[in-house]
Image (cartoon, coloured by chain):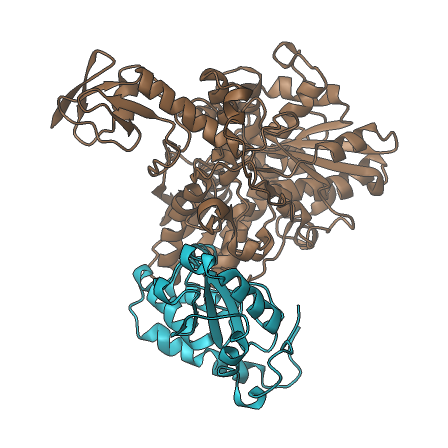
Amino acid sequence: MNCVCGHAQENLDRYFSPLYSILNSYSKAESSLIPILQDAQEHYGYLPQEVLREIAGHLGLSLGKVYGVVTFYSQFHLQPRGRNVIRVCTGTACHVRGGAEVLKAIEKQLGIKAGGTTDDLEFTLETVACIGACGLAPVIMVNDDTHGRLTPEKVGLVLDAYRSKSKAGANTAAPVSRH
Amino acid sequence: MNKITLTIDDQVVQVENGATVLEAARRAGIDIPTLCYHPDLSLAGSCRVCMVEDLETSRLLASCVTPAADGMRISTRSAAARRARKLNIELLLANHPNDCLGCDRSGSCELQRLAADLGVDRRSVDRFAGQKRKRPPVEQGFSLKRDPNKCILCGRCVRACGEIQGVMALDFAGRGFDAIVTTAFDLPYSEVNCAECGQCAAVCPVGAITEISEISRVWEALDDPDMFVVVQTAPSVQVSIGEEFGLEPGTVVTGKLIAALKRLGFDRVFSTEFSADLTIIEEGHEFISKITESKKLPHITSCCPGWVKYAECNYPDLLEHVSTAKSPQQMFSTIVKTFYAAKSGIDPEKIFTVSVMPCTAKKLEKARPEHRDSGFQDTDAVLTTRELARMIKEAGLDFINLEDGDYDQIMGETTGAAAIFGTTGGVTEAALRTVKEVLTGESLDRLNLGLVGIREAQVEIAGRVYNIAVASGLANAAKLLDDVREGKSKYDWIEIMACPHGCVGGGGQPFSRFSDAKDRRARGLTEIDQNRQIRKSHHNPDVISLYEEFLGEPLGEKSHELLHTSYQARNVR
C-alpha cells in the first residue's frame, strides 16, 4: 500500500541517505559487509529489513546471505533496541551474591523480561555470563557504565539516572511499560 | 605430473597432487561413507561421517577435506575410524525426528541408509537423548517445503543454491544449536529471489527439503467419475522414471510410462512434446520477426519457469528480451481446455489437467495468476517424476513388465526436436531447425552443443551468421546476462535452463546413485531424437492441423491470446 502523504519517496530518500553515505565510505566488496552492518546499526539503532535490502543490493549479495551473517553474530540486532542497554551479570560470583534478585528487581521495575525492550524504547535488558568485575558483585552494566554491589533496593536509583528527562523523577516503583 | 603415493587399507594408491584422501580411496575402489560431501559442490567437511585414521599419528581425519600426502598410511576400517563414523551418525540422529514412517525420503534417505549400514540402533541413539530442534515445518507457496527438524545442517542445499545457481536464497541463519537453513527473515519463497528450481531438494540427503506433493489432489481427480483427467508427460521423464524401478539412467521407457498412466486411470495420456513443437513454432516465428524487423536482440528463451522467476527477480531490465511464448506445459493445458475440449465435446470445467514434470518450478508456474487463458486455471496439478513414481508404486504396478502403450490422439504426435527440449541446448537446436528451414528451405546441421556450462555456436541462416549461446545452471546464465546488461553481448539467441544439464537434471528428478545420471538421461533423449521419423517441429502433423483448424497462423491473434504470456519485475533479492 502506498502512503497517502504524497512525500513517500522524499521520506524514503531522507531515511536512506545516511545509509548511502555509509555504503559509499566502503569498497563495494563482500568483505565490507560486516563494517557496513556495524555502521548502519550504529546509526539506526538496529538493522531494519529495508536497510538490509539496500545493503544486499549495493554489495550484490542476496538478502538471505546478509540475513545469515546478521543472525550469526550476537552484536547485530533485527529488532529496535532501547536507548540504554542494561547487562546484568549472571556469572558465578554475582549469582552467589544475589545477582538473580537484582535481575528480578529490574525486570519488575521495567515490566519486561531479560532479552526484552520497553515499549518506549528507553531500556533493553540483557543478561551476560560474566563481565569480569567479580569484586563488585553483584554487578550490572548500563551502556558503558558499571554499577557494582547492587541490591534490589538500589536498582531504582540507577535506572532513574538513565531515564530521559521528561520521565526522570517519576515513581521508580512504577513500571514504565508492560508486555 | 606430480604424483603422490599413499597406502589406504594396505593398498598402495597413486594419485595426482591435490587429490583428497576420499578421492584417492574411491579411485582404489574403497568406499568411505559421506554425507555433506557432494561431487558437484565445494568441500565442507562439516558432517564428519567420512572419518578415517592416519596410522602414523593415530589421528582421525575427515577424508573429504584432507589432502592426500606422500607416504600417508590411512585406515578406513580401523576400530577408531569405524567408531568415530558411527558415533557421528548417532549424534546426528540424536537431534533428528527419526520418524521415517511417512517421510518423503524414506527409502532414498542417505542418513537412513548410513544408519542401517553402520549398525546404528535405537539404544545407541537414545543414550544421547536431550534437547531436540523444534521448529514448525515451512510449507508456503506451491513448489517446495522445508522441515528444519529433519535438517542435518550439511549445507548441500546452501552450496547448490549459491554455487550452481548463484541465487543464495537459502543460507544458514542463527548459530550453534539454534542454527537452521532458511530464507531471509524466513520469508516465503515467493517473496525472495528463489527460482524454486528445486536443486536444494535434489541435493538434500534427507527429507528436510522436498517438493510440495500434489499426489492426493491427483488421486481425488482420478477417483471422481465426473472429472475428465488429462495428463501430459515432459520429454525428460521418459528417460529418468525407469530409475525409480531399478533401471539405469537414460533408459527410454516411453511406452511403459504411457501404459502406467493409463492403468492409473488417466482418461487421456499425451506428451508435452506436442506442445514443445508448438512452442518452437511460436518462438521460432518470434525470433524470425525479431531478426527480419531488426528488433532488439538477443532473444532469450522462456520455457524454463525457474529461469523466468530468476529473471523477474534479478534481471527485470532484461525481461523485454525474454520470449513471450508460454512454456510447453502451459501451452498444452490451454489447448486442452479450449481446442481439445471443443473438438471432443467435453465441458472444460470438467477437465482436470495434470502434468508430469522433472521440475518443482513448474508447480509455481501453473499457479501464476496469468495462466488462466482457457477461462480456467490452465494446469490443475503438477507431479514431479518422483511423485508419479510414488503413485505407480502405490498402485502396485509392475512398471518394468508393463506392455508398452501409445499416446492418445489428437495431440499425440511428437517429433525429435521436441524430445531434446528436455536437455540443455535442445530448445535452441529444435528452434533453429525450424527457423532455418522456414526462412531458407535448408536443413540445419547438428549443433552438437554439449551439456555442461556455457556453450556457444554460430549458425548461418540466409547469408547471415547468428551467434548462439546456451547456458544451464543459473550462475552460468548470470555471466551471459551481465554482458547483455552492459551491452557487451555478441549473442543473437540465448537459451537458459535453470538446472544443470537442463530438465534431465531437474529438481524433481529421481535421486540417483550414479554421478553421471544427467549425462546418461541426456543421451537417452538424443537417441529418441535420432530414432524419430519426424525431427522438425513444423512437420508435426497434429500441430499443423491445430493451426489449420483452430489457431490460424503462428503469432496470429488466437495464438497471441492463448499461447503467449507476460512477466513481472519482482523487487526482491
Quadrant the C terminus of chain A occupies: bottom right
Q: Residue at point 42% right, 36% down?
A: B444
x, y percent for residue B92? 47, 31
Quadrant the N terminus of chain A occupies: bottom right
Q: Residue at point 51% right, 56% down?
A: B184
Q: Say if residue B186 shows up in the picture.
A: yes
Q: Please name whichever residue, A81 or B162, is drawn nearer the observer in this view of the structure.
A: A81
x, y percent for residue A124? 52, 70
Q: Answer left or right for B45 relative to B232.
A: left
Task: Indicate the colour of chain A.
Answer: cyan
Q: In this view, does B100 lie above or below A66?
A: above
Task: Indicate the colour of chain B.
Answer: brown
x, y percent for residue B292? 47, 56
Q: Is residue B341 above or below residue B396?
A: below
Residue at the top extreme?
B401
Q: Residue at point 86% right, 36% down?
A: B345
Residue at the left extreme?
B2
